[in-house]
Amino acid sequence: MSASLIESKWQILGFLLFCLVLTIGCVANATSETVPTAVQTEPTLTATIAATPTQLSAEPATFTPAPTLTQAATPTSAPSPTPAPVETPTTEAALEPEIEATTEPDSAESACRSLDQLTDIGRNRNIVSGPWPRPPAWNGELHSGTGAGLSLIHLGFDVEGPTTQLTTLLDILDKYNIKTTMFILGSWAEASPEWVTEFVARGHEVANHSYTHSNLGEMSAEAVIGELERTEQIVQQIVGQSTKPWLRPPFGSRSPESIQAAFDAGYTTVIWTSSTDDWRPEYTADDMCNALMEGAYPGAILYTHSYRPEIPEVTERFIAEMIDRGYTFVPLSVMMAGDPAQFIE
């Protein structure tokens, strides 16, 4: 074989080796290029994972309306607190005036008329003579009775201060055949025992208004009991009748401790449905009578003090108005009896 031929073969072999190396290099390059492509897919995965927090952060937005729903429910449920306290006498007082307002929507019709316009009003239904059975004390505060479907109403008197108008007041009660409950201040009874005797002689029952007319809600239990027991002893000595179980705290001031202390002493704390607001010096007879009318409904427990000179007029106008509307005035013990009808003739 000639040297030129051998040289040509080596050239061909070298060329083939060069092509092989070149091919391997290209393949290597191609492989290295595909790896970054695969790595670049990771951001896609990362983006997918990153989307997860976005979905989670949307959950608070989902729950955001919840407070709105709760707040929106509040007006709807607002009436529920009114019936909720039905367990206590307070609620009956809150609900019943609404019934009365439905019956007599005209405010002018609810105003007290003058005595000249009430001259033909009859007398109260007859109440069986007392003393009436008294229920055991209740560990709570009394705001109203039931009325027992009889259109019963109670107007009691907190007795203290000047006595100059008491004869006129008692004569008005007799005129309309009214028997009621007198909440007597012990210190007043000491100074005016003849009037305590007169109350009982006219057929009224006696109750406790403390001894010193102090704020029972700020007193210790011992002090509260001392006030009540002192008045009880004084009234017992004068007329031989107990003031239990009825207590009207001065100013209506009471606390859980004073209510419990009163109960321990044998008393129910009596508040009221409405009153004359006669403690307001600017109130006229019209104002006081209208204040009573606004709180008058079956089972209402109303009160007034005895000492203002306008009270006899206010009392007569209010009594006449309510009798004209079919109401019967009763003492508190009759109002709170299990069967009040047995004491009404």
Image (tube, helix red, strand yellow):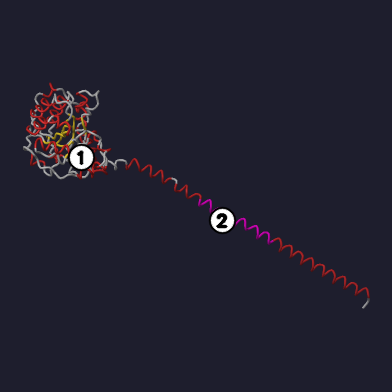
Left or right: where 98 falls relative to 71? left
Q: Indicate the quadrant where residue 279 lies.
A: top left
- Dot 1 or dot 2, earlier in sequence: 2
- Position of residue 321 relative to residue 342, above or below, is above
Q: Which residue bears the numbered disc 2?
A: 49
Residue 124, position as x, y percentages in the image = 9, 32
Identify which residue is drawn at 59% across, 56% down: 46
Q: Are marks 1 and 2 in contact (CB under 8 Å)?
A: no
Q: Does residue 151 appear in the picture of this structure?
A: no
| Secondary structure that dominates the magenta span | helix
In magenta segment, residue 198: no
Secondary structure of the residue carrying tag 2 is helix
Q: Is residue 46 within the magenta segment?
A: yes
Q: Where residue 31 sits in the image (x, y, percent)?
A: 71, 64
When asked about the image quadrant of residue 241, the answer is top left
Q: Is residue 167 visible?
A: yes
**Figure quadrant of the N terminus:** bottom right
219 left or right, relative to 157? right
Q: Position of residue 288 (x, y in %)?
A: 20, 26
